[in-house]
Image (cartoon, helix red, strand yellow):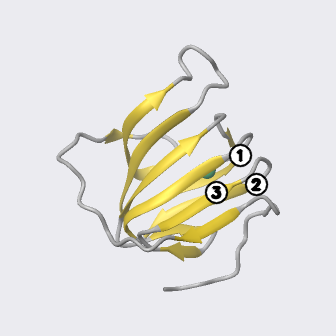
């Protein structure tokens, strides 16, 4: 695992737990391109999305990063929770492997990428604010 300096702003309410699970097998589900004008090589399978009825609504999705995929920096207006299911997920230059549970508090920022690719489960209680 590669660990580098964390370049995002942090919060005492952030949490990273390394749970004792390995990579998971996903069922054969469809993924759609996710914000291709903003993100590169990122695909989504929506689990639920409350934003159409509430601009501040919550959402959850399985998100797949193709090899070399990238998401530019955004600001969390509420809590976000990410659970790494497969591959190597890099957030603010820190690599997280399957079983990593990452909680980001309101006011924090991050950018994400994956060199070999990865799949994550992501949940947000409020939509994020894009910074680029
Ligand atoms: Fe985020």
Q: Element under label 3?
A: strand
Q: Residue furthest front?
A: 20
Q: What residue did someone put label 3 on?
A: 103
Q: What residue did someone put label 2 on?
A: 108
Q: Element under label 1?
A: loop
- Counting labels gives 3
Q: Which image quadrant is residue 15 in?
A: bottom right
Mark 1 Cβ and ligand 1 under 8 Å apart: yes
Say whether residue 48 is visible.
yes
Please state if 6 lies on the left or on the right of 36 as rendered: right
- From what the image shows, is residue 85 above or below residue 48? below
Residue 63: % across, % down: 40, 49
Q: CA distance from mark 2 to mark 1?
A: 6 Å
Please state if 123 lies on the left or on the right of 69 as rendered: right
Residue 83: % across, % down: 48, 58
**Mark 3 packing: few (<14 Cα in 10 Å), some, or many (20+)?**
some
Among the two numbered marks 2 and 1 on one chain, the one whose residue lies closer to the N terminus: 1
**Residue at the image point whose x is 48% and y is 27% from the top:** 49
Q: Element under label 2?
A: loop
Q: CA distance from mark 3 to mark 1?
A: 11 Å
- From what the image shows, is residue 95 above or below residue 64? below
Q: What residue did someone put label 1 on?
A: 76
Mark 2 Cβ and ligand 1 under 8 Å apart: no
Q: Mark 2 near mark 3, Cβ–Cβ under 8 Å? A: no
Judging depth in this view, the residue of 58 and 127 nearest the camera is: 58
Q: Residue furthest left?
A: 28
């Amino acid at each position: 695992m590669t660990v580098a300096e964390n370049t995002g702003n942090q919060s005492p309410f952030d949490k990273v737990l390394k749970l004792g699970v390995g990579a998971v097998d996903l069922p054969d589900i469809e993924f759609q391109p996710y914000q291709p004008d903003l993100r590169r090589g990122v695909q989504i399978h929506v689990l639920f999305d409350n934003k159409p009825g509430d601009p501040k609504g919550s959402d959850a999705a399985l998100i797949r990063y193709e090899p070399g995929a990238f998401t530019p920096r955004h600001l969390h207006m509420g809590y976000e929770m990410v659970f790494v299911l497969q591959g190597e997920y890099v957030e603010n230059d820190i690599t997280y492997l399957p079983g990593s549970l990452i909680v980001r508090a309101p006011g924090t920022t991050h950018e994400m990428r994956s060199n070999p690719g990865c799949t994550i489960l992501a949940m947000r209680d409020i939509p994020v604010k894009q910074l680029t």
